[in-house]
Amino acid sequence: MTSKQIQELAKQISSMLSESNNKYKETEALLYNYTGYKETIIRNKQRIDNIIQNGAEEKAKSNKGEYVQGGIKEYGGLPEEEIRQIDHILEENSKLEKRVIRIENALIHIEDDEYQEIIVLRYFKNKSIEEIATHLDVNEKTIARNRTRIINKLQTILFSEIIIGY
């Protein structure tokens, strides 16, 4: 191998490691936000019900008809603004539901892991490493090591395109 080829290979490896580190952080972000995603889905469903019952939010409603020759033509059903808002909320919920399903599918793969509770306590209940160690009656290094191992496993499941190669 030439010096130039070695440098190019080193660049590629560095890029892959950097991307892998970013995916690790993205995995943690997904886990930290998991309960928030579920809560947002519920709130969005309530918003849709509110729009259906009470009309469009915040923005002033346009008249429920349009001026045409001979008077006002009335619209039937929901006005356009309400439909637009509902469509936007449904689109947002669809994205969030896909994330939730993706996370839940990954979590299935760690159900049998002796230390899977670390994920629940750390990311869903916001417990510190010290609190988790006390709860599981192990030292903090054990928690940190197993958290990293489990996150790496979840990362490969959540971001399998890295392993497959896009």
Image (cartoon, grey):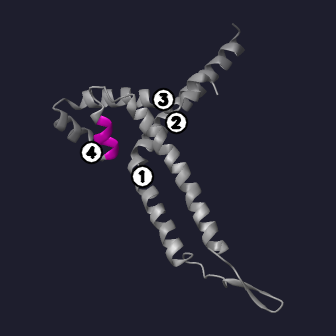
Residue interval drawn in magenta:
118-124
Residue, disc 4: 127
Residue 157's disc is 3
The reply to whether discs 1 and 4 touch (Cβ–Cβ < 8 Å) is: no
Q: Which of disc 3 and disc 1 is earlier in sequence?
A: 1
Q: Is residue 103 left or right of residue 160?
A: left
Q: Secondary structure at mark 3?
A: helix
Label 2, label 3: how many angstroms apart (C-alpha)? 15 Å
Label 1, label 2: how many angstroms apart (C-alpha)? 24 Å
Dominant SS in magenta: helix
Q: Which of disc 4 and disc 1 is earlier in sequence?
A: 1
- Residue 64: image quadrant is bottom right
Q: What amino acid is found at the position of numbered circle 4 in the picture?
A: Lys
User: Disc 4 or disc 2, which is closer to the eye?
Assistant: 4
Q: Which of disc 2 and disc 4 is earlier in sequence?
A: 2
Label 4, label 2: how many angstroms apart (C-alpha)? 23 Å
Specify few, some or many for label 2: CA neighbours under 10 Å numbering under 14, 14-19, or 20 or more: few
Residue, disc 2: 22
Q: Which of disc 3 and disc 2 is earlier in sequence?
A: 2
Looking at this view, is 91 or 64 the one in front?
64
